[in-house]
Structures are given as structure tokens and as C-alpha cells.
Amino acid sequence: MPSQKATSVLFQVTALFVLSSSIALVAVLSQSTILRTQTLQTLAQEIRDGEATLFEKTAQVARERMSYYAYSADPGQSSVWQLRGRRSPVEAIKSETPRRVEIVIGPIFSRLAQQQAINTLSIVSTAGDALYAFDNKTTLQAQTSRRPDRESLIEAPDLSLDRASLGKQLTSGYANYAGRLQHFVIFPIFSNAKILAYIYYGVDFSTLKDAFEVESNSTVWLAEGVQQNSQPLVLEASAQANSQSAQSAIFSMNEKSYALGKYGISTTLEGNQAIFFIKDISAAFDQGRRFQVSMLIGLVVLLLVSGYFVFALLRRRLKPLGDAIEVLNDLSKGDLDSRVEHQRDDEIGRIGEAIDIFREKLIGFNVMNNEARRQRMKQQEEVLRQTSALVGLLPSERRESIESEIQVIDAEIASTLNRQTDTSLSVGDDSVTQLFAASFSLLGQELSEQYRVLDEKVRSRTAELEQKSNQIAHALNQNEELLLNILPQSIAERMKQEESLIADYFPDSAILFADIVGFTSIAEKMGPQRLVNLLNGLFSQFDEFSDQLHLEKIKTIGDSYMVAGGVPVASTDHCHRLAQMALMMQQFVNEQPLFEGNKITLRVGLHTGPVIA
């Protein structure tokens, strides 16, 4: 009867333990599922924020590049929008002649498009209306019927801008050009200190998309018009984006998981346009799912094993102890040499026999536990050997400290193995885990420090490269200015195209020679400084006359000044313009102050005929 009661209590307590453990297991799994869901939501939001930031940086790079070319066509060259003469874009726009606009501004757009800086160049009136445009897609379509070196001009292009974008400073934003979303910069060009028109540089969203996808493992799509896309993944992502009210989400397709993020772009006159990012997170998603399944299996196994040990322990503890309390106390203290005499064939004998059996079981358990601990120690030694191999990869100055720590840990492992014995029971020894964590913690700290040192070296090298790049750009700028100061711009452009011989025949041209009458006597009386100031003032004004009359200054020697007409661009009225310059020069010299009571006079000679330049 007592045995039945003990058995009944044993099963009741065991069942209660299993039930409470099962409830705890369900609670842990529920909490794990909730945490995993929240983690995935947080991951999706972080991915969305990161991709949005990267897209904004991509747009910023394109904007900075367009802004740069708004004021400098090439590194080291002044802005093409400040050119003068027949090649002046400002004069071409003022002419309101589409043909001239096409000839003058077309090469500017072609160069910027070849450098992949822009996709569209448009001329916008001060009222915000697009007058002309060059577009690389239109150019590709028109090359079959036009010369390949001439860009096709679009009159009255499909472009609308908010007047708030038009001002005295460069502005940027997003707009739709011919049904394509573009990131743009717009800046004014001036004529006589007044705004003549605005220049619109635009880069397509597809160009930003390509640049973004090179830098990111994600892909980005414009929500508007995505239905024309035939990719199932893009269509599914679009459907998910339309059905989700949140800015980020996670969906699965074809046994893969993806993070979806929505982002809005503000465009002029048309409100916001939505784009969305797609990123493959299958690896992280599957890893989390595998971890959850492994945790579930581990908890179930732990529940079964714990139930078994609780059942075995209760079965032993609920038996009558009697006179075996002292033996049980010795066993509880870890003394496995204490034995119970069970020679009598009564309840006490049977209790002693049961206690003796329990002691033998404890001895076997202790042996197995010590053997398992020895195996774990050996594993720890192997881990230390592998760690030592990794330490060999570190610099010598970072190697000594961690090698000394590994030696200390190895000594502690040897000491722990020596202290183990099968005659005493030890429970709860977690030295293996602590040593394992300590070894990898030290290695992680050293690797982190090595990464920091390498990062500092990379930053230093990057700064040096940037400094050298600036020096090269400055040298190119000086070379360009020197070349334009020596030669006409058209000849300089031909030299830059590596023409080996430049010699052109002009059947009709004119040359003007001018010098100061009595220059030698004036020079002897005037002195070097005054003489230089006089010549500088005269020749500077002569240079302005030459620019106004579109003549080509050849050279100055002493007090002599030489200028030509009809070269390097042939013309029909160069003799008239050259004679007009001679009169202007004479008038300007006559207006100069007297020198020792006498006027400074200028002698001018003209000649016309063929010339080889």
C-alpha cells in the first residue's frame, strides 16, 4: 500500500513538472515567434532606410557632377557658357535661330553626354517654358539620317518646371521630361548683367538606377509604369508595395525572401512619385528560421531529458530512508566511498540495497561526467591551438600579449585536469565555457584593433591620392591657360586633337602693322617703368579693339603691334574691319597725354593678299 502511494505521488509530481515545462516551452516559443516577427520588421525598416540613404547619395553624386559641369565643361577649363565670339552659346541663344543653337550648343551636350554626366540639356526661358532641348535617346534615333557628329535639336520639348526652381542661383530637384523621371539642376546664364535664359541639365532615373545597383546588392524601381515590366519578382513587389500601408515589408517568392522598402520623390508640378527597393534576404531569413527550429528541437529534448531525470530523482528520494540518512548525507557531500550494509532481508535491507545501487549509479555518473569534462578540456586545448595559429597572422607587436594570455589559459586547463578524481563528485564546473569565451574574446579584441590600424592606413592613403589629384588638375589648368594665351582658340583645339602639321592657305587676307613714331627717343627719355606702363595701356586697348572687330592679334615686338584679318576664319569684310581698327588705334593714341609738349603719334601700315598661316 505505501509503495502504491509513493508511486502515485511520483507520477503526479512528474506529470506536474512535464505540464509546467510544456507551458513554459509554449510561452518561450510564442515569445520567440513574436520577437522574430519584430526583428524581421525592424530589419526591413533598417534595409529601407539604408537603401534610401544610398539612393540619395547616388542622386547627390549625379547632382554634384552636373553642378560641376554647369560652371566648368572640363577639369581646368572655364565654363563653356562664358565663351565669346561666334562660338558663344549666349550669342547663339540670343539669335533665336534653331540652326545656330544646334551648331553651337550641340557639341557641348555631346561632350557631356559622352562623359555620362547628363542625358538631357534644355534651354528654358525666363518664364519657365522649355524652348529647345538635346536628348541622348533622341540623338540615338536620329543618327541614321544625320551626321554622327551633330546632335539633333528638339524644339518646344515636353518639359514643365515650377517657377520656384528659377532663380539667380543653381537649383536642383526632380522633374518629368518626355514621360521620363529625371534628376536635374537648372542655372541661369546672363547677358549684359541680366538673366537671358536658364540651362537645364537632366539625368534619367534609369541612369541613377544603374549607378545605385552597382553600389548596392538591391534593385530599385519606379512604381509608376512598373506594370509594363515582365519580371515576376518586380510585379509581385509592386503588388506588395500597393497592398502594404507601411514603408517597409518582407515577402517571399519562389522559396526566397525579399525585403521591400518604399520611398517618395518630390517632383515639380506633379507631386510625389514613389519608388521601391527590393533586396534578397533569403540567407538571413533562412538562418533565423533554422535557429528557431533548432531551438524548438533543443527545448523539446531538454524537456524530455529533464522529465526523465526528475522522474528518476523522485523515484529514489521518495523511498524510505530509515537509518541510511547518514549515508545519504555523505553521498550528498560527494563522498562515494560511503556504503550501506543491506544484509538483512527486511525493509531496511531493501532500503540499504537501493541506496547502494544509487551510490554505484553515482559513481558511474561521476566517471562519465569526468570523462566528458576531460574531452571538453581537450577540445578547449585544440581551440587554443587554432587560436595560436590565428595569432600568428597578427603583427609581431600585437602578438606577444595574446600569446602570454593563451599560455595562462593553457596552464589553467592543465591544472583543472590534474584536480579531477573519480572518488569525489563535482557538479557545476563551468571553467571550460569561461576559458573558451576568454580565448576568443582576446582574439576578437586583437583582430578589431588590427582592423582599426588598417582602416587608418586606408584613410591616409586616400587623402594622399586626393592631394595628388588636385595637383594634377592645377597643372592641367596652367597648361590650358598658357596654350590659349599663345595661340587662337581654334588652332589650340586642333593642336589638342594632335594634328601634326597645321598650315592653311588663305587666298584673301589682310595684315596691319603699327608702331610709335620716334619710339627710341621717347624710350630714352621716359624711363623703363613709365615706358612699360605706356605700352601696356596702348596694347591692352588695341587688344580690346581686336576682340570687338573679330580680328586676330598676331604679336607685339617692342613698340610694334601686328594684327590680321581673314585668318584663321576666312571672311569677306576683313579689310574694312582692319581699316576701322587702324582708325580706332589712331584716335586712341591721339587722346593720350602730351609727352614733353608733343603728341605721341602712331604709324600704321596695311597690306592685303594671300597668306599661308
Image (spheres, grey):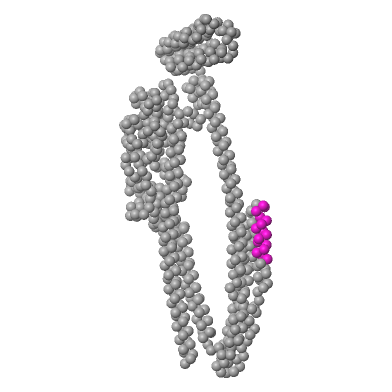
Viewer-nearest residue: 104 or 396: 396
Residue at the image point whose x is 47% and y is 8% from the top? 590
Residue at the image point whose x is 51% and y is 20% from the top? 487
Question: How far across and down, in percent of the image, does residue 485 sit?
Answer: 52, 21
Check if residue 10 falls in the magenta segment: no
Residue at the image point whose x is 37% and y is 31% from the top? 198
- Residue found at the far bottom of this picture: 345
Which quadrant holds residue 417? bottom right
Q: Is residue 513 left or right of residue 432?
A: left
Whether 283 is drawn above or below 510: the answer is: below
Which quadrant holds residue 102? top left
Is residue 189 in view? yes
Question: How far across and down, in percent of the image, does residue 407 sit?
Answer: 67, 62
Question: How far across and down, in percent of the image, does residue 290 sit?
Answer: 47, 63
Question: Taken as a whole, is the magenta stretch helix, strand or loop?
Answer: helix
Question: How far across and down, in percent of the image, does residue 350 sit?
Answer: 56, 91
Residue at the image point whose x is 50% and y is 26% from the top? 497
Q: Is residue 370 left or right of residue 68?
A: right
Viewer-nearest residue: 228 or 289: 289
- Residue found at the far front of this picture: 597
Is residue 161 in view? no
Viewer-nearest residue: 53 or 99: 53
Q: Which residues are magenta?
A: 396-411
Whether 395 is drawn above or below 332: the answer is: above
Q: Is residue 383 left or right of residue 39?
A: right
